[in-house]
């Protein structure tokens, strides 16, 4: 694919986005207006990241549930197999950026690394799918593979998930004026590719409009995007093609994350793949410090 929005818009209902929108999506030299999905519940309730009761915390924004363990039950109707989606959500607590990778029930898995810049310092990741801790040590569980480095305004998250599950998150507190850049690394370019699961994301889409009549905007998997306030004609904000374009880079070339990550589960057990029982891989006996550097063995493994 060339640089920019890939193939334009994929309408799944009536044209959902007005040209008078306050928000725009840019990729390369392309720009389209977007509208938030609106709801009457908090973004935590909308995302509905389900965990067993002992895993739920204010830190991860999860809810107790048993229909989609370690995955987003609330966005099920928006999910697509082998697809990563993103959208704005406006709820009673303001505007949020939501991302969901994968699809419940689909027989696929995957890995994604996102670098995000321009996030307001007074905002927060209201949902972290996955982030859960060992109840005895308080450290991230050793089955929690996802890595969250989310201090300051530049964040990096490494996700990986198994069959029939999802990963993702929701950042709340974008405010009235913002300009957020997402630099993606999918599949072989993602930091955790092949570490725990093998799978492929084939499509990246930005949703605009409403839950019932969302416009699905196809994106180039290899190019960064920018979501910001303004208009595509530049009347409210100058276009910044240099920053919104460019190559996404390879997550493996950098220090590959801090903190334990997570494995998402679904079905008979805790694991997104298969298996019975509550735990993903057994007891949470060994943990890594969230925020720690990868050890040399990890780097060697990626070099093989």
Image (cartoon, rainbow, N blue to C red):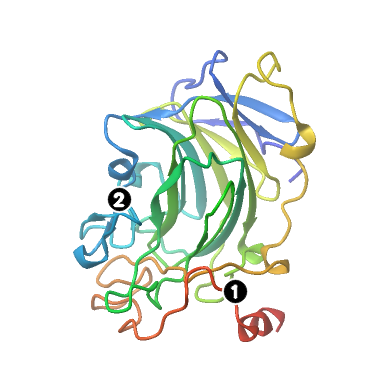
Residue that appears at 35% across and 44% down = 75
User: Cα distance, mark 1 to mark 2?
Assistant: 32 Å
Residue that appears at 65% across and 66% down = 188
Q: Is residue 71 left or right of residue 186?
A: left
The image shows residue 185 at horizontal and vertical percentages of 64, 57
User: Relative to the observer, which residue lies in front, 114 or 126?
Assistant: 126
Give the structural element (helix, strand or loop) at label 2: loop
Which numbered mark, 1 or 2, is in the foreground of this view? Answer: 1
The image shows residue 123 at horizontal and vertical percentages of 46, 41
Within-10-Å neighbours for mark 2: few <14, some 14–19, many 20+: many
The image shows residue 215 at horizontal and vertical percentages of 49, 29
Vertical relation: 125 (above or below) 71: above
Mark with earlier residue (1, 2) = 2
The image shows residue 267 at horizontal and vertical percentages of 27, 67
Regarding residue 102, the answer to whether it shows in the image is no
User: Relative to the observer, which residue lies in front, 24 or 122?
Assistant: 122
Vertical relation: 159 (above or below) 218: below
Residue 129 occupies quadrant: bottom left
The label shown at residue 293 is 1
The label shown at residue 10 is none
The label shown at residue 73 is 2
Within-10-Å neighbours for mark 1: few <14, some 14–19, many 20+: some
Residue 277 occupies quadrant: bottom left
The image shows a total of numbered marks equal to 2
Give the structural element (helix, strand or loop) at label 1: loop
Residue that appears at 39% across and 63% down = 131
Regarding residue 173, the answer to whether it shows in the image is yes
Residues tagged 1 and 2 counted as in contact (Cβ below 8 A): no
């Amino acid at each position: 694919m060339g640089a920019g929005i890939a193939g334009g818009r994929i309408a799944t209902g009536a044209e959902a986005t007005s040209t008078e929108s306050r928000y725009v999506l840019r990729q390369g030299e392309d720009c389209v207006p977007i509208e938030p999905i609106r709801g009457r519940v908090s973004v935590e309730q909308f995302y509905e990241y389900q965990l067993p009761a002992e895993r739920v915390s204010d830190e991860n924004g999860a809810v107790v549930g048993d229909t989609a363990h370690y995955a987003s039950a609330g966005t099920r109707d928006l999910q697509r197999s082998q697809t990563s989606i993103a959208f704005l959500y406006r709820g009673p607590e303001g505007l949020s950026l939501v991302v969901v990778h994968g699809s419940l029930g689909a027989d696929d898995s995957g890995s994604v690394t996102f670098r995000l810049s321009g996030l307001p310092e007074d905002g927060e990741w209201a949902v972290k799918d996955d982030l859960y801790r060992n109840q005895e040590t308080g450290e991230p569980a050793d089955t929690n593979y996802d890595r969250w480095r989310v201090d300051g305004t530049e964040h990096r998250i490494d996700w990986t998930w198994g069959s029939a599950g999802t990963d993702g998150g929701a950042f709340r507190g974008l405010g009235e004026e913002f300009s957020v850049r997402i630099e993606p690394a999918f599949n072989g370019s993602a930091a955790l590719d092949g570490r725990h699961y093998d799978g492929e994301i084939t499509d990246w889409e930005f949703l605009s409009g409403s839950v019932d009549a969302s416009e699905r905007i196809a994106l180039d998997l290899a190019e960064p995007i920018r979501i910001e306030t303004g208009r595509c004609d530049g009347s409210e904000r100058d276009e910044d093609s240099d920053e919104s374009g460019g190559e996404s880079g390879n997550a493996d070339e950098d220090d590959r994350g801090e903190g334990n990550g997570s494995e998402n589960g679904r079905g008979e057990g805790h694991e997104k793949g298969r298996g019975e029982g509550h735990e993903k891989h057994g007891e949470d006996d060994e943990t890594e410090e969230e925020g720690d550097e990868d050890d040399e063995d990890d780097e060697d493994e990626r070099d093989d």
